[in-house]
Image: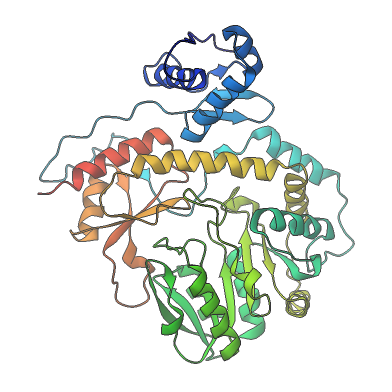
Amino acid sequence: MTTSLPLVVDRAAGSSMAAQITAQLRDAVTSGVLVAGERLPSTRDLAATLGVSRTVVTTAYVQLFAEGWLEGRHGAGTFVADVAPGLPPIAPSPVPVPVPSDGPEMIELQPGIPWAAGIEPDVWRRAWRHAGTRPPSFWPDPHGTPELRAELTAYLRRSRALKVTPDQILVTRGVANGLAAVAAALISPGDKAGVEEPGYQSAREVLRRAGAEVVPCRVDEHGVIPEELPAGLRLLYTTPAHQYPLGGRLPVARRQALTAWARATGALILEDDYDGEFRYDVAPLPALYSLAPDVVVYLGTASKMLTPALGIGWLVARPDLVALLAAKRREISERVPEPAQHALENLITTGDLERHVRRMRLEYARRRNVLMDLPGLRGDTAGMHVVLELSRPAREVVAAAAAHGLALHTVDRYYLGEPTVNGIIIGYGATPLTQLRRAAATLRTLLLPA
């Protein structure tokens, strides 16, 4: 049911009609006149009601979408987003007070988990209905289905400006699976493999299990530092789009230096395009792969865009390397379930995947904004997490937060050696907005100067 809106447009006012509509709708949400989930009139209907052009209403709606006050539901219309006023800060306490056994559940702020509930049910069902219409292959193609690889070439061109062909794509079960495939094919026991320090623990473990000697490679606020890379690396795993976990974006000059290093040393760069889809400051830089496809393997996944439950990713590399990886996969009868591939193919073909990513970009930006005034913030320009650098010991803050119902993690868990950043990591992808506001209010109080 569409909500009737109490709006008035004054043509003699000093502000534009679109600005007046924007301000009145914003006030209606913050005052509780409009509540989360209420459906708004279409731009055409509201324009007719107010006696203004449709462009005026569209301009107001677009502004409110960008600010996070409204959200669209494919095929259903425009709705008020969950932007209820945040809870007031808790009273400061010198000693953390344990949560009683019958108290609220812990608010989990683990990084790297997307908001799976944001997937529109109709879209999800349609994708799997499509998968159900496809008969099983006589024997699965170790490269992945031809249809999905064709769709991925178009998707990667649109989303990441990658010019690739289907024979450069291997469908995987995710980034870790793609990394494992490369390591199994190219790593001999004792080979040195570089991983960012701090960095992704799963990457370290995958390389270690393949027999590599894992070597930490220092990062700063921009990412990995090419001139400090250790000698003798066979592979280097890196996250240039949004360094995990500190959040730096590798500048163009370093990208060029890194690819030059790889060519000079014969090393292979494994580019995990972590959080490449979710940027909030500027458009993402071109993928590292586009600079040097001869020495870079590009790793992507649908896990962060949609849900880890789908279990689909992709690897982009030179055709000869993809052929080698596919042959190794065939030898051990490893495969990616075809129904999941068909479902993802449908999500790309229909445009539902890119519409979902656009919606999630706005949703995550809204959640990120709740945290923006926390002290010591870094890594806030992309992704689904931020890092707070602390003056107090991070474990002390984590313990105090747990006593107030917040489950946090320290940054030191991402180091192979001695930590150089004292802080906590706050994941906000899967945390409801109301819980996130409560968490932010709690943290503001806990981090007040003593």
Q: Is residue 112 above or below residue 34?
A: below
Report whether 284 appears left or right of 281. Answer: right
For the residue pair 402 and 247, the one nearer the viewer reads as 247
- The picture quadrant where one finds residue 41 is top right
Res. 282 visible in picture: yes
Colour setting: rainbow
Q: Is residue 302 above or below residue 361?
A: below
Tell me residue 222's x, y (percent). Answer: 41, 67
Report whether 373 appears left or right of 262. Answer: left
- The picture quadrant where one finds residue 318 is bottom right
Q: Residue at x 26, y 64 (%)?
A: 422
- The quadrant of the rendering that contains the N terminus is top right
For the residue pair 106 and 374, the one nearer the viewer reads as 374
Q: How many marks?
A: 0
Res. 98 visible in picture: no
Tell me residue 188's x, y (percent). Answer: 60, 90
Q: Is residue 91 above or below residue 9?
A: below
Tell me residue 416's x, y (percent). Answer: 37, 76
For the residue pair 40 and 163, the one nearer the viewer reads as 163
Q: Residue at x 77, y 76 (%)?
A: 319
Q: Is residue 76 above or below residue 382?
A: above
Report whether 71 appears left or right of 102. Answer: right
Q: Residue at x 43, y 83 (%)?
A: 227
Report whether 254 appears left or right of 356. Answer: left
Q: Residue at x 81, y 42 (%)?
A: 130
